[in-house]
Image (cartoon, rainbow, N blue to C red):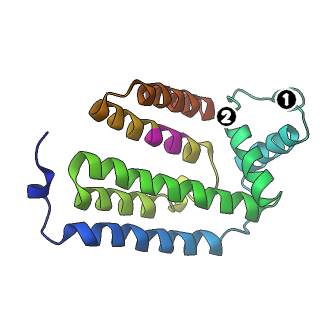
Amino acid sequence: MQDRSRLQPPSAKPWALLSVIAVLIFVAFVRLRVADVPLERDEGEYGYAGQLILHGVPPYALAYNMKFPGTYYAYAAILAVFGHTPWGIHVGLLLVNAATILLVFAVGRRLLGAYSGAVAAVSFAILSLDRWVYGVFAHATHFVVLAALAALWLLLSALESERRVLYFWSGVLLGISVLMKQHAIFF
């Protein structure tokens, strides 16, 4: 593997992590300011299915569509932890988004170095707030990207360490990403 330190500006390492922390604070500030907005159409569907799951009703028993149930279970977990309110759902999204930003940084750092990882994470963070992609709403895509990036990070770790258990968990997470939304099959 090539030496990535030659590709980085000399002062990139300390500033890379600081810039990711700064963007995490900025994103948290923005998301908390809009956390009380009413639920968007898909969020209402996911929230209702999540509530049914919390009441012991399995997916598709009382409400159904063509989507896989992964996002319903993610919503059930968020509702159980943060409450059955739009604020609770959007705070759960804040944590999912923060974890995704950190994974973008971790994968980017592993592949191209700290500077490139920070640029990727900051770019992703800002773009994930965009209103044109409904970034402030807890759509299934947020959960897909989280699971797929975690799987990619584990796969990179498995390739470096050759530990079979990491290959297994990487595959499990890729499967979970598909359960969140069918489009993740391309990962």
Is 112 on the left-hand or right-hand side of 47? Answer: left
Left or right of residue 129: residue 93: right
Any magenta on residue 108? no
Q: Which residue is mark 1?
A: 58
Please indicate, yes or no, whether residue 62 appears anywhere in the rendered image: yes
Q: Which mark is residue 70?
A: 2
Residue 115 falls in image quadrant = bottom left
Say which amino acid is labelled 2: Gly
The residue sitting at 56% across, 75% down in the picture is 29
Q: Residue at x 51, y 45 (%)?
A: 146
* Viewport quadrant of the N terminus: top left
Local crowd size for mark 2, using a 10 Å CA cut-off: few (<14), some (14–19), many (≥20):
many
For the record, the magenta segment spans 144-150
Q: Nearer the viewer, residue 55 or 32?
A: 55
Main SS, magenta residues:
helix
Q: Relative to 52, is 25 above or below?
A: below
Above or below residue 147? Residue 37 is below
Q: Is 179 displayed left or right of 121 in the figure?
A: right
Identity, as a three-letter code, of the amino acid under mark 1 = Pro
Q: Which image quadrant: the C terminus?
A: top left
x and y, in percent, of residue 24 in the image? 47, 68
